[in-house]
Amino acid sequence: MRLAIPLAITFVAGMIMILQFFVPATQSMGESLQEWYMIVASFAIFLGSVNLLYVHTHRIRFKGRNWKYSPVTIIGFAAMIITGLVFGIEQGKPFDYMFTQMMVPMGATMFSLLAFFVASAAFRAFRASNWRATLLLISAFVVMLGRVPIGAMIWGRIPLISEWIMQVPNLAGQRAVMIGAAMGMVATSLRMIFGIERSYLGGAD
Amino acid sequence: MSTFIEKLGNIDRRVIFVVMALAVIIPLAVRLSLPIPIDEGPSKDMYDAVDALPPGSTVLLSFDYDPSTMPELQPMAIALVQQLMTKDIKIVSLALWPMGVSLGNEALSYVSDSLGREEYVDWVNLGYKTGGGVLIVRMGSDIKSVFPEDYNGVPVDDIPVMDQINILGDFDMIISLSAGDPGIPAWVMMAGDRYDISIGGGCTAVSAPQFYPYLGTGQMVGLLGGLKGAADYETMVRIGVDDPPAGTATPGMAAQSVAHLVIMLFIVLGNISYLANKKRKGGVK
């Protein structure tokens, strides 16, 4: 029963979502399912918040690895929720101030660190070890120069060659990946709808 | 000499970090300025597509990013909003990412204030709703049931800019500024392909290559890729405008130019050392 009910729900929901494209009578059922999805997805945010608090209180209680960072997380979480609920989230309110003056620069800082790691990793790993790697290296140089103004200053055709690399070899590769992934998605979806693929049930056989 | 070249491959990563930091900081500090050439390409296509919209059109602008990608995407947002508002095109905005709402509001308010536009008459921010692709599909049949109120809690029925907007098909164009999923692919697949609406977009430099297939098939009318896309757009939007607001992407391109040269220099040094070591060991044939 524990297996049959989830499989039946998956089959019915999956078939309704497919049939709504072909059978007008099932369209309203498909729309209802979409609304249910949005409600369930909203609830997942609440569950995520509860889980975040649980994980960090648990870590503090049992002095887990790097537990000293957990109070910072909980205080930040509480500060954002309390200021948002008490004062509102409109522009000029404390919530908005904390978002623009703390969240934004900290988030941007984290992403900016990538530049340093990319430089270090490229220095250590980007080797012209064979002709294929050399081709990749040359392409990377052309695209890197073509994406910045200094490339056009060195030679006016570099941006054009860079754009050609993006629009021809890159596009061909990306399209192959995209079509392959889409075919895989269709196959996996059908396997799930018909109960062949069951790993999403948490390993039940 | 050969020992020095061989040791080049073992430069301490802290040295690389310091050189990289200087490569970014110095051009910004001395306000190094480089000309931004505007060539035919996805940025120009995007500008032309927006420019071709008649005044009074309505565009849906989706802010699908968060603060981590703001340095690349926020300048695009400001330049796009500036072009749309200058052309008297109405903007309905929303976010598929929770933190995109505030960033979108910031861009819209900033440009709206500088151009004397009015919230609810010229633009509205509907806020964030979870659901990604499913949300887009629901908006295809009824936007007001999905967003009964805007970001500030004002009923959408009372908002003038929403008067003629009931379904996604009522928009003249959809533009997604996207840092991941949900973002551009969801808008292309769920809105562009299903409801035959023009889709434009902006994304981070690292994710731009994956959207080129959509440009090749005409599923997207244009694409702004990374800081270069933002700088291209800033430059195009500024043409013919008196006293345009200062953008952040154009000055950033000088820093990015130097940073790219530094990365390339390190790659060359690493390869010289690698080849020297290989030759010493008799590996080069």
Image (spheres, coloured by chain):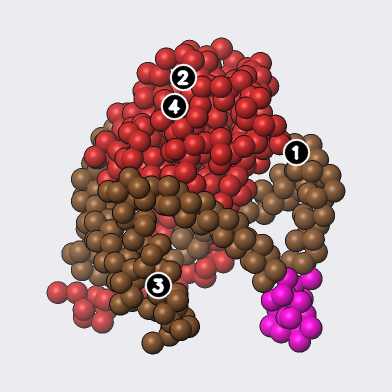
Chain colours: A brown, B red
Upstream in sequence: badge 2 or badge 4: 2
Q: Secondary structure at mark 2?
A: loop
| Residue A156 on the magenta segment | no
- Marks 1 and 2 on same chain: no
- Marks 2 and 3 on same chain: no
- Nearest the viewer among B201 and B234 is B201
Point out residue B216 in the picture as x, y percentages from the top left corner.
24, 40
Calculate the distance from the C-alpha at mark 3 to the C-alpha at mark 4: 38 Å
Task: Return the residue at label 3.
Answer: A8
Query: Which mark, by number, is residue B170?
Result: 4
The chain ID associated with circle 1 is: A
Calculate the distance from the C-alpha at mark 3 to the C-alpha at mark 1: 45 Å
**Is label 3 in contact with label 4 (beta carbons under 8 Å)?**
no
**Is label 1 in contact with label 2 (beta carbons under 8 Å)?**
no
Q: Is residue A53 left or right of residue A200?
A: right
Upstream in sequence: badge 3 or badge 1: 3
The chain ID associated with circle 2 is: B
Calculate the distance from the C-alpha at mark 1 to the C-alpha at mark 2: 28 Å
Would you call the spot at circle 1 few (<14 residues within 10 Å), some (14-19), or many (20 or more)?
some
Q: Residue at x 67, y 49 (%)?
A: A105
Pair 1/4: label in front: 4
The chain ID associated with circle 3 is: A
Q: Name the amino acid, label 3.
A: Ala
**Image: magenta residue range:** A52-71
Pair 2/3: label in front: 3
Outermost residue toward the front in this view: A25
| Residue A56 on the magenta segment | yes
Calculate the distance from the C-alpha at mark 1 to the C-alpha at mark 4: 28 Å
Q: Name the amino acid, label 2.
A: Ser
> In the displayed structure, would residue B63 be above or below residue A203?
above
